[in-house]
Image: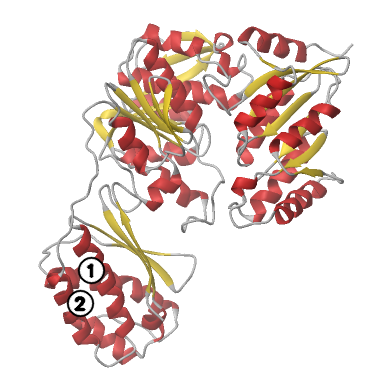
Amino acid sequence: MTSLVELRVLEGPNLYFPRAAIKLTLDITGLASAPTQTVERLARRIGLDGARPGEPDTGFRQRFALRAVARLVRAIAHESGTQRLAVRVRPTNDAHLIVVSYPWRHRDRAQEMGRAVADVLDSVPGEDVEQAVGHAAERVTASPPGEPPHTITPQIPVVAVTGTNGKTTTSRMIAHIARTDGTVVGWSNTDGIYLDGEQVEAGDYSGPSGAGRALALPGVQLAVTETARGGILLKGIGLTRNDVSVVTNVSADHLGLQGIDTLDQLAEVKAVVPRITRRRGWAVLNGDDPRVYAMRNVVKARPWVFSRDPNSPAIRETLDAGGRATTVIDGWVSVLRARADPDPLVQLADVPMTLAGLSRFNVENTLAAASAALALGVPRETVVDGMRSFRPDPEHNPGRMNFFTVPVTDGEASVVIDLAHNEAGLEALLEIMNGVRRPGARLLLGLGAVGDRTDDLIGRLGEIGAMGADVVAIGHKQRYLRGRTKAELERLLREGAERVGATDVAAYPTEVACLAALVEQAGPGDVVGLMCHAEREEVYAWITDHGGTGDSPQRLGEKVRAARVPVA
């Protein structure tokens, strides 16, 4: 059995280093179970003369293995001509697997060193472990250097947005605000690459290639990049730095993938983005999320927090440290500086994305976008105009909290389309649906899940949906099964719904079919919500074909006010 489980080339800043690095996943079973005398010989060969490796297959041997592998990498590097090399080693949730990372300047030689390290580990159970180290160094020395990293150093301002929820909405809003003043903006997100509001390439570009493509667009003066967890882990960030970073929040999503099993680990991944923000730039952090706010301790940039609570300790501490804050005071989006009066920018009621302040998540996204735009130096008046003109519709924010009115028997019903791909997103969708429900009306929810979520998360979506809605149905996402079957997803969602008393949950083969079935059941004033991931354009077309229309800000305001009318 080979010790090398995976060798991954990270092209830019990553979880381990602020520059290009090699990531090795190694199986240390051989080292952990080898006779003590053999392991002691390896220790002496790599310079760990006084090490005590512990008995085979003990916790002490596991701890020794972490130290020994780091030392082995440095020994091979030194003997092949590299005088100093930073090495980081981490355990995983599997006691026999570890992750090793080191920076690289020459692609081929760096990869050869990774393979050579694994070969030495493969030799540990044998008697020639000392020679294996020397042979490994010789291989690395003989390897051709290969190309240098292609990480891009930006020549224009860059805003990088990350977080579990709200990345796309926030990045779109920042781009819209900047365009309001005539700036030519290129931006990349999960939908594609955009130049000045027009999509030039479709696809998920929330990884490193998206940032490079946005910067390469003709005439671009500002780049706004959405940076997802997967891109950071699998390829690294494609840019050496950014001028303003935004971290919206950290919540449960994609856990159990690429070695990220806890929220704290996920927060560490997201923190890569503000860690590469320029010292004179700004790190815009959610002061209401403890994991995000804690990132201020690992960044060089100046802190700018946002919080819905003007009395938040995060705001007080940030202002005391010379930073800035954006919050809500008496219904106004307001900017705070130390020893200065608050600057009220705009009332929440005049920001369509917040639904008159009803949408907690979109209030936070608005605060984040305003902070980032101001941190860039966008004029105050332009920021205000941009917030007032950015709407929750398919033109400005496709697939995120899009509101429609559709005809039903004896009246009209509301339809809300949103990605809602995790627990926090679904809770936000239900919050919005409740906010426009008239007294006595019902909520009808189209549930769905992508296949690469954990069983617990999928079941939890069923629970949340069934607790919050009067009618629940499942709409499958054929293109996002990701190794699961429809039957498996149905079972998990139904089990979750049954835990809170919902039975007979219908399932439909597509999101469109699910929406059609729910609208057919809806009555006047009811609100239909759809977790829409796979068929957004088809859903829009169905709504239009059945007489539905997008809601204007004025129409949305009417729905919110009607929902607040007390029952007689």
Are dots 1 and 2 in contact, CB under 8 Å?
A: yes
Q: Residue at x 47, y 42 (%)?
A: 291
Q: Secondary structure at mark 1?
A: helix
Q: Nearer the viewer, residue 292 or 449?
A: 449
Q: Horizontally, is 233 left or right of 482 in the view?
A: left
Q: Nearer the viewer, residue 55 or 496?
A: 496
Q: Residue furthest front?
A: 545
Q: Horizontally, is 121 left or right of 392 in the view?
A: left
Q: Is residue 133 above or below residue 214?
A: below
* Residue 306 visible in the shown view: no
Quarter of image, res 369? top left
Q: Which residue is mark 1?
A: 113
Residue 175's x, y, as percent? 40, 21
Q: Which residue is mark 2?
A: 136
User: What's under tag 2, amino acid-wise?
Assistant: Ala
Residue 323's x, y, as percent? 33, 25
Q: Locate the C terminus by quadrant.
A: top right
Q: Is residue 469 above or below residue 498?
A: above
Q: Residue at x 50, y 10 (%)?
A: 389
Quarter of image, res 209? top left
Q: Residue at x 14, y 65 (%)?
A: 144
User: What's under tag 1, amino acid-wise?
Assistant: Met
